[in-house]
Image: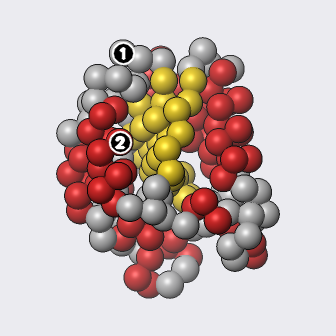
Amino acid sequence: MSATILLLSGPNLNLLGEREPAVYGTATLTDHVATASEAAALHGLSVVHFQSNHEGDLVDAIQAARGTHGAIIINPGALTHYAWAIHDALAAFDGPIVELHLSNPNAREPWRHLSVVAPVATGSIVGFGGHGYRLAVEAVAAVLER
């Protein structure tokens, strides 16, 4: 299996650093990708990042990852709560999948409490801000080493 992790970022994550810094922090998406890449390198892994504001683009990226990437880390943004097409695409991926959120959706508005991604993820990392990117890579590395 490939030593690459596909890091997927959903809608509005391209606005990190500007959008609601009290909730999401001041680091940019580029900062978070760098954190993930640095953590991956420590385990002999690399990160390929893709961000889209469009559900179908994310589904296409997940499908293309089959057989080419060893794992997926996904922050689906608001798509977390209703994107069954992403759920289905992730269910067809054979490697570890980590759902990642900067904030803790369970501590926020009730509509954010449902994740359609969680049932097909190996695990979820939520509420640790930018440190979650490092934690997600560590989790993937641990699963891949087993």
Is residue 141 shown above or below 60?
above
- Label number found at residue 83: none
For the point 56% across and 20% down, the residue is: 45
Q: The residue tagged with tag 1: helix, strand or loop?
A: loop
Answer left or right for 88 relative to 145.
Answer: left
Q: Position of residue 38 (x, y in %)?
A: 71, 29
Determine if residue 146 is in view. Answer: no
- Check the image and tell me how it is coloured: secondary structure
For the point 30% across and 50% down, the residue is: 59
For the point 50% across and 51% down, the residue is: 51
**Amino acid on which the number 2 mark rests in the picture:** Ala
Determine if residue 39 is in view. Answer: yes
Confirm or deny contact between disc 1 and disc 2 (CB under 8 A).
no
Please name which of the two marks, 1 or 2, marks the residue nearer to the observer. Answer: 2
Q: The residue tagged with tag 2: helix, strand or loop?
A: helix
Alpha-carbon span between mark 1 and mark 2: 17 Å
Q: Which residue is mark 1?
A: 1
Classify the position of the C terminus by image quarter: top left
Tag 2: Cα neighbours inside 10 Å, few (<14), some, or many (≥20)? some
- Hey, which quadrant is residue 25 in on the image? bottom right
Q: Position of residue 143 (x, y in %)?
A: 45, 27
- Sequence-first disc among 1 and 2: 1
**Amino acid on which the number 1 mark rests in the picture:** Met
For the point 41% across and 31% down, the residue is: 71
Q: Which residue is mark 2?
A: 61
Q: Position of residue 138 (x, y in %)?
A: 59, 32
Answer left or right for 109 relative to 89.
Answer: right
Is residue 50 shown above or below 107?
above
Which is more toward the observer, 97 or 78?
78
Which is more toward the observer, 32 or 136?
32
Q: Position of residue 55 (x, y in %)?
A: 34, 60
Answer left or right for 60 relative to 47.
Answer: left
